[in-house]
Amino acid sequence: MGAIADINSTKSAFGFYVDSVVIRNYLGGILGGKTLDMTDYPNDVLKAGHVVIRNTTDDTYKPMPLNEAGDAYGSLPDGCEYVGVTVASVPKDRPFVGIMHTGSVNDLACEFAIDGIKAAVKTALPTLVFEHD
């Protein structure tokens, strides 16, 4: 069973982020996007450029976990693979996201540094480029 989210519309404001600065050039992604399993994600907003992973056993998509301090990416869980990055910021309770796997991301504008997992992400997604000015 995949992730479940309430599709009933309620008004909310979660801020104005730098999504257009983070996603420099969108060239390709998962058609139609995905609903993410946000069960273990600690923040109220998932921001553009966050790495997305997929559990290969149950085909569940979710945000890359953070370390215990919540200030950097943690380790890739067993049975999971990198699939891309979020295209836009979304509130945790509305986790409907576009996922880019081909294009360029401004790594310095992302909320969490990619440095610790960059080599592994580049191996899994060679068409995703992390760059900055």
Image (cartoon, helix red, strand yellow):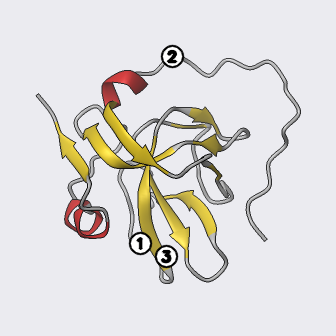
Q: Distance between the residues labelled 1 and 3?
A: 7 Å
Residue located 31% across and 69% down the image = 124
Q: Earlier in the sequence, mark 3 or mark 2?
A: 2
Labelled pair 3, 2 in contact (Cβ < 8 Å) = no
Residue occupied by mark 2: 16
Between residues 27 and 34, which one lies in front from this camera angle? 27
Residue occupied by mark 1: 76
Q: For this view, does 54 lie left or right of residue 110? A: right
The mark lying in front, picked from 1 and 3, is 3
Residue 110 visible: no
Q: Where is residue 108 in the image (x, y as percent from the top left)?
A: 22, 35
Q: What element carries label 2?
A: loop
Q: Is mark 1 on a helix, strand or loop?
A: loop
When asked about the image quadrant of residue 49, the answer is top left
Residue furthest right in the image: 8
For the residue carrying disc 1, how many other residues have a C-alpha within 10 Å: few (<14), some (14-19), or many (20+)? some
For the residue carrying disc 3, how many other residues have a C-alpha within 10 Å: few (<14), some (14-19), or many (20+)? some
Check the picture and name the quadrant holding the N terminus. Answer: bottom right
